[in-house]
Image (spheres, rainbow, N blue to C red):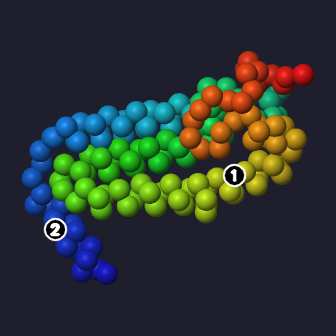
Amino acid sequence: QREFAHRIRDLAAVAPVTMSWWSWIGAAIALLAWLGEISADRQLARWKRQPANAGRSCRRGWWRYSRHPNYFFEFLFWSGIATLACSGGWTALVFIHPVGVYVLVRWLTGVPYSEERALARRGEDYRRYQQETPVFWPWWPASTAPSGKETP
């Protein structure tokens, strides 16, 4: 296993550094994903600082379109890195990592654990949030309630 890691390191060290269109697309995806993750984290932190929001789910910004935008942007970041790596060959192999990140975060570690904790902490409010908001992939919420206000 150690020998394999050294071979990969050596391959990366001698690989020519050229910016193909794959490189530019991958770099753009990674940058946008990084900015999206920062934005989602700041939105949630701002939401949590407000005492009136205690026990409620954030439905503003990215959190209106995905229950886990931070995980989505993490996946997107690694997809951008994989796309960037396509310029060096091994195109199919480089996408193993983002697919693995998606499977781990979506079904094994991140989302299931976060959902369980959110239900325990926020109860019925989070159940409604689950019904209104897509779990991972950002999309329009089922509810059109503005700014997280409940609909009658």
Q: Position of residue 16 (x, y in %)?
A: 9, 53
Observer-nearest of 119 and 65:
65
**Looking at the image, which residue is at 22% across and 42% down?**
23
Q: Position of residue 32 (x, y in %)?
A: 40, 33
Q: Position of residue 94 (x, y in %)?
A: 31, 58
- The answer to whether residue 131 is left or right of residue 3 is right
> Which quadrant of the rendered structure holds the N terminus?
bottom left
- Quarter occupied by residue 80: top left
- Quarter occupied by residue 45: top right
> Which quadrant of the rendered structure holds the C terminus?
top right
- The mark found on residue 114 in the picture is 1
Dot 1 amino acid type: Ser
Dot 2 amino acid type: Asp
3D distance between C-alphas at marks 1 and 2: 39 Å
**Looking at the image, which residue is at 19% across and 37% down?**
21
Task: Name the secondary structure under disc 2.
Answer: helix
Is residue 45 something one can see in this rendering? no
Q: Is residue 111 above or below residue 4?
A: above
Q: Is residue 97 above or below residue 71?
A: below
- The answer to whether residue 23 is left or right of residue 33 is left
Q: Residues within 10 Å of mark 1 (few under 14, many from 20)?
A: few
- The answer to whether residue 33 is left or right of residue 7 is right
Observer-nearest of 65 and 92:
92
Q: Is residue 102 above or below residue 56?
A: below
Task: Name the secondary structure under disc 1.
Answer: helix
Is residue 105 something one can see in this rendering? yes
- Quarter occupied by residue 40: top right
Q: Which residue is mark 2?
A: 10
Observer-nearest of 27 and 39:
27
**Looking at the image, which residue is at 43% across and 37% down?**
33
Q: Is residue 77 above or below residue 28?
A: below
Q: Position of residue 150 (x, y in %)?
A: 84, 24
